[in-house]
Amino acid sequence: MALTALDPRSALVVIDLQNGIVAMPTAAPVAPIVQRAAALAEAFRRHRLPVVLVNVAGIAPGRTEQSRRLGELPPGWTDLVPELNRQPTDHVVTKHSWGAFTATDLDGYLKAQGVTQLVIAGVSTSIGVETTARQAYELGFNVTLAIDAMTDTNSDAHANSVGRIFPRLGETGSIAQIIALLDGTPSAAAS
């Protein structure tokens, strides 16, 4: 479903735009993804809406066929990229699994803020972004996915999430459409 509206109490959730993750190879260049996510964060802050910056500092235990053990992380690996311009009002969530809600305070924080809708961006589309979107949907939040502010390590996985999964979890749109809705210019959002 195309982007139609943003609730008055929407929040932005930016997934894993941190030094260690953005250094990995991605399907689309990561620099423009970071710039677009930073623009969204500034727009949400300008409207005094919650901004949640998520980083990952480990992985869930358990066996998988494709082991991705992180081992000991080098200094600065979990640091959020400076382009996000972290502010004292931003809420930071450190996760140890794919989804930002698992074993974190995210749900409680959002509910305490009266948030009813999440705009989600970040890396990786098919892992951290999709898992967080699925969790948000299951918890009753309206979900919007900023598809030009996300990428993946695999272009097929990115395309599957954007084309097949996200329309079942919420609405998708560009950062220009999202910012236009925030700024109250819905005619611009329709373009």
Image: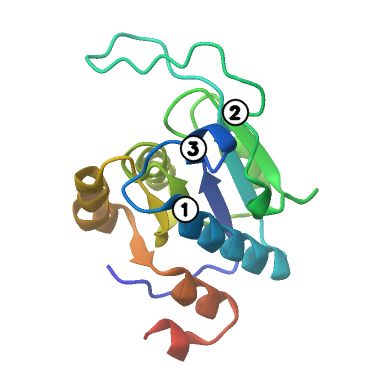
Amino acid type, label 3: Ala
Residue 3, disc: none
Left or right of 62? Residue 122 is right
Residue 105 image offset from top left, x and y in percent: 62, 32
Number of other residues with Cα within 10 Å of mark 3, as a class: few under 14, some 14 to 19, many 20 or more: few
SS class of the residue under badge 1? strand
Residue designated by label 2: 77
- Residue located at (54% from left, 50% from top): 13
Quarter of the view holding residue 50 = bottom right
For marks 2 and 3, give the CA distance. Answer: 9 Å
Q: Is residue 68 above or below residue 109?
A: above
Which quadrant holds the C terminus?
bottom left
Total labels drawn: 3
- Residue located at (54% from left, 74% from top): 179
Q: Earlier in the sequence, mark 2 or mark 3?
A: 3
Residue designated by label 3: 23
